[in-house]
Image (cartoon, coloured by chain):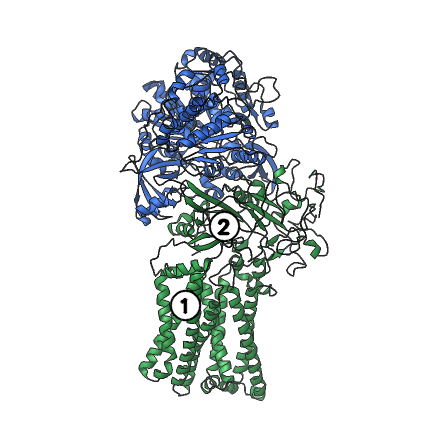
Chain colours: A blue, B green
Amino acid sequence: MLFGRRKKNPIILRDKGVVQWKYATCGYCSTGCAMEVGLDADGKAVTTRGVADAPVNRGKLCIKGITEAGILNASGRGTEPLLRAHSYDPWQSVDWNTALDRTAAQFQRIQDKYGRDAVAVVSTGQILTEEFYTLGKLVRGVIGTNNYDGNTTLCMASAVSGYKRSFGSDGPPGCYDDFSHTDCLLAFGSNLPEQHPVIYWRLKEALEQRRFPIIVVDPRVTMFAQFADIHLPITPGTDLVLLNSLCHVILEEGLADEDYIAAHTNGREDFAALVAEYDPGMAATITGIDEDTIRHVARLYAGAGAAMSIWTMGINQSTHGSDGVCAINNLNLITGNIGKPGGTSLSITGQCNAMGTREWSSCSGLPGYRALENPAHREQVGSFWGVDPAFFPEQRGRFMTDIFPAIESGQIKALWLVATNPMTSMPNTGRIRKTLEKLEFCVVQDAYADVEATQYAHVYFPASVWAEKDGCFTNTERRVNRVTPVSAPLGNSRPDLWIFNQLAKRWEQGRRMRFPESASEVFEEMKALSVGTGANGQPRMLDISGMSHDKILAQRGIQWPMRDGDETGTPRLYADGVFQFADGKAKLLALPWADNNEKPDSDFPFWLNSGRVVEHFHTRTRTGKVGNCNKFSPTAYMEMNPDAARELGVENMQYVRLVSRRGDAIVLAQLTQRVPRNMIFVPFHFHDCVNRVSLGLLDPHSRQPAFKQAAVRIERVDQAEAARLNREMRAY
Amino acid sequence: MTVQLFEPIDNARPSQSLFPLRHNEPDYALLKDNSSEELNRYGNRIALIDLVEEASSLNINGVSEKGFNPNRNKQHAFHFTADNCIGCHACESACSEKNDLPPHLSFRSVGYVEGGTYPNFVRMNISMACNHCDDPVCLKGCPTRAYTKHPEYGAVIQDPDICFGCGYCTWVCPYNAPQLDPVAGQVEKCNMCVDRLEVGLKPACVSACLGNALNFGVVENTPERREQIDTRIPGFPDPAITQPNIRFQQTRSMPRELTRTDSAPVKYRRDDSAGHYRPAVDKKAGTARLWNLARLSSRENPLVLFTLAAQAAIGLFAMLYLGALAGSGVVSTVVNSPVYPGAVLLCLGMVAFGLFMSTVHLGKPLRFYRGFNNIRHSPVAREGAGVAGFMAFASLHLLASLAQQVWVLDYLPGLAAFAGLFASAARVTGALALISAALGLYYMYRCYRIKARPFWNHHQTAFSFLGCCFYLGALGLAAVGGVALVLAGLAPAELLGWCGLLMGFGLALEGLGLYLHARDMSTAENEGAVSHYVQRTTFGKTYLARNALLALAAVGLLCAPLYVASAAGLGLWLLLALCAVSVAAVGRALFYVLVVPTTMPGAFFWKNKGFEQHARDIGLATMPQVGVVPDAH
């Protein structure tokens, strides 16, 4: 008897009444967590759980995955195709045929009038690989515009470009299992605990078994920086200097793996000459990291049995993002840390299928890491698809970040946006608004009708979302995993694959080609295209011929390459030291640093830094509607140093106005010593917020914008007016 | 003590009617206590079922099957490695998903404290749910007996179907564990995931943890790869209050001073001699003294009215009864006048009004009758019983008094034969009413002696309640007595003089309490000091004005016999009485709005009272996904 109660009350626990679990891979970030979606007796998706034996997440999910069932029936889902003559007209609901016919007719009219490239297609990292492949076939083989890119240009383009420049091909060489083998981990601009918490958990599990040093390079004291053994609070935009200097110390002190360099790389001489200029004393003045620490980190990294580097947007979103990636590759090449357990250059990717679009969407070339510039590739793909190879352009066209300026200046008249929201995600959204107004025709294809990009659209295609569809995602560690249709498409929405196939039929050329209806048939086409010989004379690296939808499900995801006959996939690339250039050697690149950022000055005295928070994904079209995510940051805010705030008279929880050379934005101030005195950090998820002020200078190689380096000033505002504006800006 | 573990887990499973277990549940989700201690650090038995006759089913959702967890008879506890928490919200969302919670509720919340200077900066996240305490103050406080401490796992489980939504458990819990849902009008809280425990799984939050911070097992067991089972971390209230079943590891060095990002003006300072952190005032609102009269109005307004009305009624009744008993000529005149039943009716009316207000305050007012279920433990139930007893006996007293009234006897002359009986009955019921009232008043006071609310947990509460009985009761006496005397053609000066003395005494009593309170709160090392800081800044002018009015009214009324005979004196007396009433109203409103509980630190948006209010003010709260419930009106 406890506290006088003999007869206990029965216990009632709420139960969502799950009667069936169906398999999917999480549709948010690229960690690639395998999950099961729970369906109740009515067949409604009510909850999720991690797949217990999945190699990636071992039953775990982060907040977004745990609450993901909520996105299927979230408010704002599009249920009917919509049409209007002008962006200022009200929307009319129409049937699919009308919407598709109008779209095809407008594309054809504009191409006839202004040329094939006057139509641009900007896709995403969110849809399934089979859909990417089909979209690529439609755009490259049927519509025939060379202005075709994905929004991965905003997040992963620098990693892609860097991998290609160093190794001869895209493709992250490492895997999560490397955490269990490494002796030193160096993280650049990556905040795993908050942005990829399940990958962080894998790292934490490895650390609890075996201690090894963690070094985090980040201008902000993120959770990861705080947990690091060594935190390097670097001056924004100077990673390349730090990396060159680390290599300087390693070469100077004879710590490099010269055997590996000699056997597997080219370019040592130019590279050595360049890094010789970056002695730690000079680097210290630029990076803000003292020279002793630089030397210490270099020795630690070079001295570790196996050492690995990971990075995310801190490197990629920079004017020298591609160079930064190459510099990380340099560091790992000279220490022999590529392709071995615990030694790798692993970019931590953003979107669930950023990898899928890189591999198969033909955005940057042709499917399966093929290049438009390569006549043999044009020939292979042309004959496989039944397209005259001469129909393909001989050079890659505009990147996403160059497509918008081309709309602005009139070379592009029509735009098709697929699952992307440039009205929130592009830098300098004031300019994007003016740009989109100039379109003669704009199609938005998205699962959510309230995505801000629809403001300038003439046609809206309601796409099905995530686990209403069938296909695969590829994650950060090249693991292809399955999404199965767990519930029927909402309303009259349709899977993107169906939309692409239906649109293809509106062209004579499309009717002649084969556009399989089922995802598994599409996958078989991709498998067939994945086989062949690479530039280095070896079998193609991106080979998935050994996979099938069933095998992928049985193994809870398989890492490519998996060749026909293989039992399973391959955890690491380049284990044999043979790279994808013709001579099989990687390139050590001499990477001079240019100081070209917009930096704080007396008019705009603060660095503007932006990034993610754990509870939101990208432009909040999903997480903004899931209460148990959104409530943790329901409105726009910034982190500001309290000492700087005191000087300006700004208090915690007060609204301030951010002003840059582009525009202004209203945010709530959160005062914290997480950021230095001359920097603010603004989560990028909120519409009409940080990207009204961001600059986004473009990387010369990857054309990725430098979201994280710009200058702003902070002004005090009328609190009531700011609150009213904040309320009005929050449609969700 | 050694126990046999369920290995393999699914073989031990008799059926699928309990929590549906997968054949391959991951290792981190499995409970693994091979042995346990006999006693916990507080000297309490860990094996709880030994205290009851035999193991029985928990009867979860109608399943009569008993779980096969071999440790189900033992007190379990969360273990939190504060060094590891990354603040990723996985625990909170896993909990909300398992318990199907709307956004504005959560059984587990993550807040944080931070300190240092860039880049030498530390943020420590704290994930906190219910600690299933050895001394469950929620269970003891709940008037409806909605809480049970189960001998299985030592789980403290609350039944929302019993709860009437008074929210008292949310006052007494130092950790913010019970969640008052203003939409459903009831409290809900962490249930320890007992359905998962029954099949050997750790709770949903623990299994979801991505920082390897949360763990769970038999209390006083150190989890795998952990070295510390401490009872304190910065920001966590004094464990002596409830003997909570949570243990901590926190070995990384922390800055001397840790601040909160939410609006609570609390920070935590290391006390080197004690070896842990103590709350201190964080002057977030500066030092400016403001009025903020509008903010005196709060959700607790019904309780302001209830306590004041009840205290006035008790004071008046006691003065009438005891005054007559003591042979006071003036009071006897009143008691023997035809006004007396009206005076008793006034007492009853005030209490009824107060009870009505406090019932309106409930989430589920129609369940008001459950308020006496927990007489054994709850001061709220005892307060209710006392006040209800007063109502009952005072009503009987009213009847007995009426039966002696001349105008009643005119109508019912037969009653005259029982005059003696009615006189005795009036005496007895009056005495019983007085005893009930005294008990009610005492437990009304005990209700606020809450360790988790240091601002209330002070003698001042007693001084204030008793003082109010005097000065509001005496004001009532002056009112009814004045009528009685005027009807009898007598001058009210003597009565008003006496009442002035009583009121002055009552005000002085409250003033003394306030003085001692201010003295103690100024030096307190707890949230009481924080409340006092808010009192002197946000409500600084209101506070000073109230104090000045109190002093003026006390002195003025104590001098009443000197001047009240004149017409001008009568005017002054009335003015001072008005001051006394406003002192009571403002003082009691301050009492409720000022209290800062020993709750866990919040985050910038979630569990930040400042943001919640802002979201309501600007209309963000109308979007359910903001997680803030709009004001009801």
Which chain is mark 1 on?
A: B
* Image position of A75 with respect to A286: above or below: below
Residue B192 image offset from top left, x and y in percent? 60, 49
Residue A191 image offset from top left, x and y in percent? 46, 35
- Nearest the eye: B110 or B420: B110
Type of residue at label 2? Pro
Disc on the earlier residue, 2 or 1 = 2
In the picture, the disc for residue B585 is: 1
For label 1, the SS is: helix
Q: From the viewer's perspective, is the residue at label 2 or at label 1 nearer?
A: 2
Instruction: Tell me the residue that label 2 is attached to.
Output: B234
- Badge 2 crowding class, 10 Å Cα cut-off, few under 14, some 14 to 19, many 20 or more, is many
Q: Quadrant of residue A400?
A: top left
Residue A323 image offset from top left, x and y in percent? 40, 23
* Image position of B555 with respect to A710: above or below: below
- Nearest the eye: A219 or A531: A219
- Nearest the eye: A394 or A58: A58
